[in-house]
Image: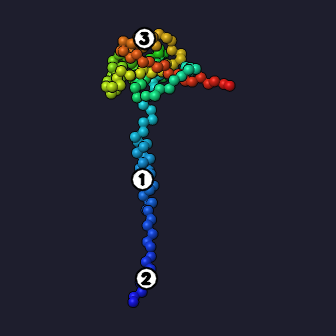
Amino acid sequence: MAKFGKKTKAEVSIPTSALPDIIFMLLFFFMVTTVLREQEILVDQKIPQATQLQKLQKKTLISYIFIGKPKNTALYGTEPKIQANDALIETPEIVQWVNQERDMLPESDRGGITISLKVDRDVKMGPISDVQDELREADARRILYASIGKVVKN
């Protein structure tokens, strides 16, 4: 009878030489596709403090209007300006801007558009009132006034 020898078990190993390449490809992918800031702020912002705040649940329905003194005073002057998205606009253009923002939303969410006013605390009430009147004319009834939370010391 013939002698049978023991079979040696072959070790199965997973090659890890390509692992760093895959990790760096994923890192570069996320670095390229991530949006860090949606808008460039062209006006000064010192947001006022508030004591009672609510956090929003659905932030996709919010469009932002910034009101403040322009950062580039040599080009735009020192009077408060209105910024919608990345452009400075005048008060009569707000109705058109609201309609454009509303058209970008899905049809089911168009009635729920919310306008967030981020107003510098040094701006007088006149420009804010003008913006509110234009928003009322554009039928944008949901308005938020952005503020920062007041630090309560115990």
Residue that appears at 45% across and 60% down: 16
The CA distance from mark 2 to mark 3 is 95 Å
Q: Is disc 2 in contact with disc 1, using a CB cutoff of under 8 Å?
A: no
Q: Which of 110 and 35 is in front in this view?
A: 110
Mark 3 neighbour density, 10 Å: few (under 14) some (14–19) many (20 or more): some
Residue that appears at 50% across and 21% down: 146
Front of the two marks 2 and 3: 2
Q: Outermost residue, right direction? A: 154
Mark 2 neighbour density, 10 Å: few (under 14) some (14–19) many (20 or more): few
Q: Which of marks 2 and 1 is nearer the N terminus?
A: 2
Q: Position of residue 117 (x, y in %)?
A: 46, 19
* Location of mark 1 (residue): 22
Q: What residue type is labelled 3?
A: Asp
User: Secondary structure beneath disc 2?
Assistant: loop
Q: What residue type is labelled 2?
A: Gly
Quadrant where the C terminus lies? top right
User: Position of 13 compared to 147: left or right?
Assistant: left
Residue 130, disc: 3
Please say whether residue 70 is visible from this viewpoint.
no
